[in-house]
Image (spheres, rainbow, N blue to C red):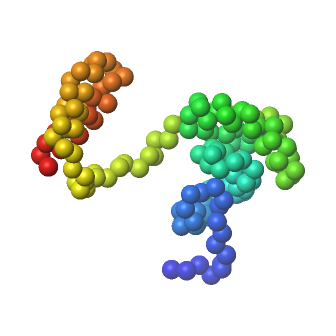
Amino acid sequence: MQSTNKQRPFHIYGTRDRKTSFVATDFLRSNDRLAALMPTALRVGNLQRDVKAILPPMYAGCDVLSFQEATLTLAVPSSAVAAKLKQQLPKLQAGLQKKGWQVDNMRIKIQMRPNVPVREELKPSSLTLPPTAVEAFEQLGETLPETQQNAALIAAIRRLAERRKKS
């Protein structure tokens, strides 16, 4: 069912997928209360686009969280990225001001991304390891100190050796 109001679909910049963007804008338009969010969504999306254009590609994981009272809050995936981004803040602020954004203050928040796609189970590899290599991995798995930091590594090494034994 098409509406008689022919509004041109538009893309919210900053969304990772154009199709998702169109679905989001249609959803926001569908309700009067939600439609009030549209200007804010567009503003943050446009700001996200400008931030991406100004920052080097290594900061592609940085997202605009909010822009209120001339304070821009950026989300970054790790403290290492946050430390490097702090060096870029003067350049970013100047670039945004050139584009007409009144940015007086900037904040950085570290946010782990919960929506990391689950890795599909890998197909059996055609790589074969000689028996001595498999034995070396088994030995390594047995000789590493069983600490909390090594737990994932030890489990991975043992799985690798077990899979290669079966091959």
- The front one of 122 and 129 is 129
Left or right? Give the position of 115 relative to 106: left
98 relative to 157, above or below = below
Residue 68 position, x and y percent, is 75, 40
Identity of the residue furthest to the left in this view: 166
Tally of numbered discs: 0
Q: Quadrant of residue 158?
A: top left
> Which residue: 65% across, 61% down?
12
Residue drawn 75% across and 38% down?
A: 88
Residue 48 showing in the rendered view: no
Q: Is residue 84 left or right of residue 162?
A: right
- Left or right side of 15 for 131: left
Residue 21: give x, y in percent of width and height: 58, 63
- Residue at position x 85%, y 43% from top? 94
Residue 97's place in the image compared with 1, above or below, is above
Q: Is residue 125 visible?
A: yes
Instruction: Pick whichever, 34 or 166, lies toward us.
Output: 166
* Residue 166 image point, x, y percent: 12, 46
